[in-house]
Image (cartoon, rainbow, N blue to C red):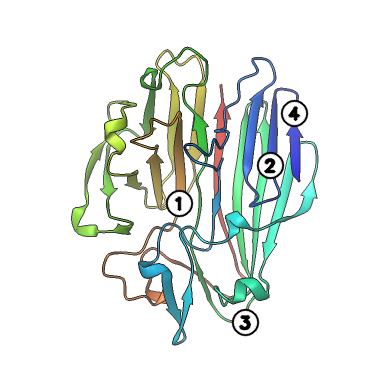
């Protein structure tokens, strides 16, 4: 099942499976902005990552001397959410803990994903995590939206660029295999727009440390005739990713409140690098928005 939002200018479709954004269409031009999950390249549109982002060492972690197993990016993206609020321009979907989640994640929680058309061309996305347990919970959360590149038939992947503001040098986090290696950190200069080249992604995603500071990222054709702008409010990281070998026609821009295990992680979830800790009855909110043009 899916839910549609429509403000007269853009039509948005959200699947109840994973609370995943699966379509954004400009009603005047007919442009489809979201990647359409071609399984020959990548069979997802915009998965929501919870309660981890990235990979755990050995796909496992410990909590109170017990070992739990969880695969990359967590389980939310593969679960059914319930619609708890809906209007023509807003939908809020919810996932709560269950016997099935307790087997791999021993915490009680409420995870809401909200989509809201805030203007004629802008969609706001919020992740709201509530601790419904009687002790602290530990989690990461993030988005993984993929966008069609090129947007128009006849254009080329290399006709597009990424522009990141504020324009400055960012700390670039790097992975060794699927794990974070802080010894490999380097500087990444965004003072010049980044023309899309597949060679830039041969070592996986470009990951920038944001430290909770707001940034704006434009993905657009060189003449700026069409594209998207992502405004990230307070994320710890952003990942820029496309497939290298297969020449997939998409780019993902991924705001993360968390990251993969470090290469030397001890496996204790309370010690996990960049983990979020939430007290009982408290709520965490992370948000970003997408403007389509």
Q: Which residue appears at 47% of the width and 12% of the height?
A: 154
> Nearer the N terminus, badge 4 or badge 2?
4
Give the left or right position of residue 254, taking residue 178 as reference. right
- Residue 45 lies, in percent from the top left, at 56, 40
**Residue at the disc numbered 2:** 14
Q: Looking at the rendered structure, which numbered label has been put on residue 134?
A: 3
Q: Nearer the viewer, residue 177 or 97?
A: 177
Report the mark closest to the observer, 2 or 1: 2
The span from disc 4 to disc 3 (Cα, nearest Å) is 41 Å
The span from disc 4 to disc 2 (Cα, nearest Å) is 15 Å
> Nearer the N terminus, badge 2 or badge 3?
2
Report the mark closest to the observer, 1 or 3: 1
Q: Which residue appears at 26% of the width and 47% of the height?
A: 171
Report the mark closest to the observer, 2 or 3: 2
Report the mark closest to the observer, 4 or 2: 2
**Residue at the disc numbered 4:** 7
Under tag 1, what secondary structure? strand
Under tag 3, what secondary structure? loop
Q: In this view, which residue lies farthest toward the right?
A: 87
Give the left or right position of residue 116, taking residue 213 as reference. right
């Amino acid at each position: 099942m899916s839910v549609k939002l429509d403000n007269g200018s853009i039509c948005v479709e959200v699947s109840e499976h994973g609370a995943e954004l699966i379509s954004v269409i400009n009603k005047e031009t007919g442009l489809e902005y979201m990647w359409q999950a071609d399984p020959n390249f990548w069979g997802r549109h915009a998965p929501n990552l919870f309660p981890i982002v990235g990979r755990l060492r050995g796909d496992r972690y410990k909590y109170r001397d017990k070992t739990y197993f969880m695969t990359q990016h967590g389980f939310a993206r593969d679960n059914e959410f319930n619609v708890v609020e809906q209007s023509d321009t807003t939908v809020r979907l919810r996932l709560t803990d269950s016997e099935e989640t307790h087997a791999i994640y021993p915490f009680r929680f409420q995870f809401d994903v909200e989509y809201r058309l805030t203007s004629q061309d802008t969609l706001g996305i919020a992740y709201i995590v509530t601790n419904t347990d009687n002790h602290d919970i530990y989690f990461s959360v993030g988005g993984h939206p993929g966008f069609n590149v090129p947007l128009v038939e006849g254009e080329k992947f290399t006709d597009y660029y990424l522009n990141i503001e504020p324009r400055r040098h960012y700390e670039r986090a790097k992975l060794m295999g699927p794990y974070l290696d802080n010894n490999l950190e380097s500087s990444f200069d965004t003072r010049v727009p980044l023309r899309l080249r597949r060679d830039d992604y041969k070592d996986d995603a470009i990951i920038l440390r944001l430290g909770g500071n707001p940034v704006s990222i434009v993905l657009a054709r060189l003449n700026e005739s069409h594209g998207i702008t992502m405004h990230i409010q307070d994320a710890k990281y952003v990942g820029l990713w496309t497939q290298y070998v297969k020449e997939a026609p998409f780019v993902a821009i991924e705001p993360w409140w968390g990251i993969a295990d470090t290469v030397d992680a001890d496996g204790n979830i309370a010690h996990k690098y960049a983990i979020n800790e939430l007290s009982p009855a408290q709520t965490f909110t992370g948000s970003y928005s997408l403007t389509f043009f």
